Image (cartoon, rainbow, N blue to C red):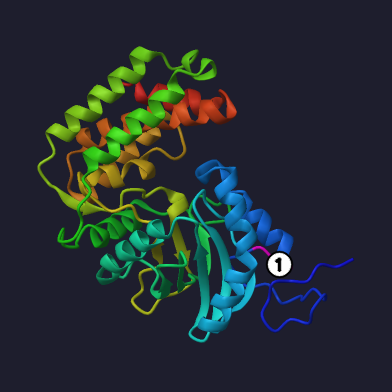
């Protein structure tokens, strides 16, 4: 028996097929799909809170759809904090995010609006601070740069993106990079103690990475507003935009700190250890930072990434390359 889709205006009990739009997975959205997507946030929020959130999602979605005149198309890939849906709004394609953590989305809206002058973030169209929902422009086709189908960014493209993102005022940005890194030390440090990680990345290697990170934080004199989570999965390629800026950043975690922190995930992506080092030099010359400083940050990132990969999927060729790069003189 077909399950009724959670699409305003749909005939009860009859799934609705619509032509696929770029940037989301074609699938009829049913109420069980929606509830399952909400329950999948249990790792972040715990089973009880995620389950309660999931049960209320269908009613919440219908209310938001009526209030904001939305046509729901389907689920988009979600992170650990929100359920994300492709929708159509009167202004065009949109993305609706709903989270059990209303404060998280309120902060994200504030960060996106802070970055509006850069021309590098989607426009926020509406928000419901009490309901934990936000609606924003959907970037089309919206392929993330970590997708195998995406055209890899060039150093020049990444340099232009960084130049725009790093040009905003620090007014209203309270968090600093040191806080972010200290949180990382606790989170990644706990993973380093796992047997499947410790076998390949010793406590001494992790300790040196922490010391290097602290040294870099102590010697940072720039103190600019950075995106804070600028990996390739948080950058979308747009088909076209009025201002010509086709790389668009999402999910900022704004803080004040070293510009190099926003560059390491471009450096530590693919290739050999030598190719990553060359990528650091190429990018550093374009954005006018000390290449050795960028390399130091990138090697810290390689250890962090290696620990994360080992804790989730075990050793592989890429993990070995990361460690080779991290231990280069």
Q: As drawn, is 274 to the left or to the right of 261?
A: right
Q: Position of residue 46 (x, y in %)?
A: 55, 42
The quadrant where residue 71 appears: bottom right
Which quarter of the figure is the C terminus placed in?
Answer: top left
In the depicted structure, whether residue 46 falls above or below residue 315:
below
The quadrant where residue 63 appears: bottom right
The residue sitting at 20% across, 56% down in the picture is 173
Q: Nearer the viewer, residue 161 or 166?
A: 166
Q: Is residue 35 magenta?
A: no
The quadrant where residue 296 appears: top left
Q: Position of residue 8 (x, y in %)?
A: 66, 80
Q: Main secondary structure of the magenta part?
A: loop
Residue farthest to the right?
Answer: 1
Q: Position of residue 237 (x, y in %)?
A: 46, 63
Q: Position of residue 78 (x, y in %)?
A: 55, 55
Mark 1 lies on a secondary structure that is loop
Residue farthest to the left?
Answer: 221
Q: As drawn, is 196 to the left or to the right of 209?
A: right
The residue sitting at 59% across, 29% down in the picture is 313
| Magenta residues (range) | 25-30
How many numbered marks, from 0 up?
1
Q: Which residue is mark 1?
A: 29
Which quarter of the figure is the N terminus placed in?
Answer: bottom right
The residue sitting at 77% across, 76% down in the picture is 16
Q: Mark 1 packing: few (<14 Cα in 10 Å), some, or many (20+)? A: many
Residue 275 visible to the viewer? yes
Q: Nearer the viewer, residue 316 or 42?
A: 42
């Amino acid at each position: 028996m077909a399950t009724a889709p959670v699409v305003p205006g749909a005939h009860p009990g009859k799934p609705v097929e619509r032509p696929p739009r770029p940037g989301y997975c074609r699938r009829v959205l049913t109420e069980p799909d929606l509830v399952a997507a909400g329950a999948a946030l249990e790792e972040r929020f715990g089973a009880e809170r995620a389950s309660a959130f999931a049960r209320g999602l269908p009613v919440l979605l219908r209310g938001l759809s009526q209030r904001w005149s939305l046509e729901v198309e389907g689920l988009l890939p979600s992170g650990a904090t929100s359920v994300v849906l492709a929708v159509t709004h009167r202004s065009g394609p949109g993305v609706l995010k709903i989270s059990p953590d209303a404060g998280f989305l309120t902060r994200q809206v504030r960060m996106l609006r802070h970055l509006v002058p850069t021309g590098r973030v989607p426009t926020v169209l509406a928000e419901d601070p009490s309901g934990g929902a936000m609606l924003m422009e959907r970037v089309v086709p919206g392929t993330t740069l970590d997708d195998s189908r995406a055209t890899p960014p060039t150093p020049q493209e990444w340099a232009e993106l960084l130049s725009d993102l790093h040009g905003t005022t620090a007014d209203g940005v309270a968090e600093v990079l040191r806080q972010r890194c200290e949180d990382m030390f606790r989170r990644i440090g706990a993973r380093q103690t796992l047997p499947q990680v410790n076998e390949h990345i010793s406590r001494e290697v992790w300790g040196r990475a922490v010391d290097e990170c602290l040294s870099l934080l102590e010697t940072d004199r720039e103190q600019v507003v950075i995106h804070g989570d600028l990996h390739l999965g948080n950058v979308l390629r747009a088909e076209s935009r009025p201002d010509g800026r086709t790389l668009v950043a999402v999910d900022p975690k704004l803080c004040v700190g070293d510009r190099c922190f926003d560059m390491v995930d471009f450096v530590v992506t693919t290739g050999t250890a030598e190719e990553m080092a060359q990528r650091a030099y190429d990018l550093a010359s374009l954005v006018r930072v000390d290449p050795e400083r960028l390399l130091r940050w990138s090697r810290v990132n390689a250890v962090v990434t290696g620990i994360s990969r080992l804790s989730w999927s075990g050793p592989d060729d890429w993990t070995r390359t990361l460690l080779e790069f991290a231990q280069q003189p």
